[in-house]
Image (cartoon, rainbow, N blue to C red):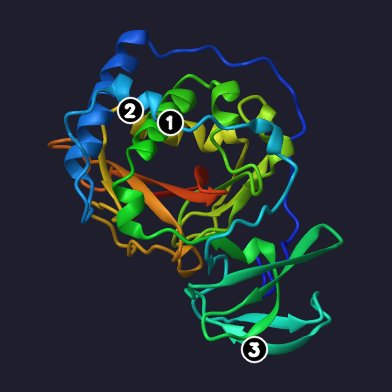
Amino acid sequence: MRNRDGVGRSSRKLVDHNPLPERVYLSAVIEMLSLFLLLSLTACTRSTIPIDATATIEQISTQAPQLEPTQATTGFIPSSGTYAVVWTPEDEMLPLRVPAGIAGSIVDELTFDARGIQVTGNSTSLGSSLWVEIRGPDGEMGWVNSWNLTEEVPGEVFCANPEILGLLEQITMAFLTDDIDALIGLINPSRGLILRHDWWNPEVIIRPTDLPRLFVARDQLAWGALSGGDFLIEGSFEQVFSPILKDVLSQTPTAVCGDIPEGVTSVPVVWPGEYANLHYYAFYRPSPEDGNRFDWRTLVFGFEYLQGKPYLTLLVHYHGDI
């Protein structure tokens, strides 16, 4: 998690390098999933602009962006569009400071969901953070940590963009087959991949430099605790989060844009306020018929735009809890 100025708390990094695990998903399963993913996305997308349901998988795939993984360490790259606030909790404000840095005086504040922010083009590096000068929606001027800004894109534009369908297909195949080479170019090169085992648990941040070892590292990462208890969730991505991804993506889930399907649970399904300006697709795997009604999962894939191109930034897991 991040504090009110976007300065990150310490997180564990991936360091080990072990052989890749055995691949267990057959090509027939992958082909079936590709077809279902396309049909499900075009049928279930919530949008004010309809997606062309006649497009084929091949047509959608060719529309996916040509992403360059070489940008992995370049950091924040301002565009000419407007920006929105991210990674600021709903009960906090994002302070504008002069001069840049947490020692600067607070001259104004932005709400957690503020939009219409302009970047002046002035920036400065302070330690590991990049601070940028902005003009707020009401004309207020000041400096903020670039971690707390994201390119502003209307929700209906995101949900109607066929480019996202191509990205989702590629991301799904990469996770099912542990294909890190295919996945790296689809992940936000500025933030890396941010994971939450449950929406109430802390973030686990896989930084861009650690992504190449995502499927093979064996560091025991701290994912938080199970709801209603003190049982801590610890393990590597491959041990803890990869099985969740494969459980959902290999069982022809229902896909919805901008909403989070849910099953029976004692814990409310909440989209955290710090992600209010991130757009997402949710994949819902319902509980089995005549089985445990709490045995359902939803995975939310959150995206950000960099220089007008969408990248996967965030994965949040929801599930039945008693």
Q: Which residue is mark 1?
A: 64
x and y, in percent, of residue 282 in the image: 33, 47
Name which of mark 3 and mark 2 comes first in the sequence: 2
Q: Which residue is mark 3?
A: 108
> Is residue 219 left or right of 151 when viewed as pictured?
right
- CA distance for labels 1 and 3: 40 Å
Give the position of the N terminus as an image quadrant.
bottom right
Depth check: give the residue in front, 269 or 282. 282
Depth check: give the residue in front, 289 or 128. 128
State the mark number for residue 34: none
Q: Are marks 3 and 2 in contact (CB under 8 Å)?
A: no
Under mark 1, the amino acid is Ala
Does residue 219 appear anywhere in the picture? Answer: no
Q: Residue at x 44, y 13 (%)?
A: 24
State the mark number for residue 60: 2
Q: Are marks 1 and 3 in contact (CB under 8 Å)?
A: no
Q: Residue at x 52, y 65 (%)?
A: 82
Give the position of the C terminus as an image quadrant.
bottom left
Question: For the residue labelled by badge 3, is the local secondary structure a helix, a strand or a loop?
Answer: strand
Q: Residue at x 62, y 35 (%)?
A: 236
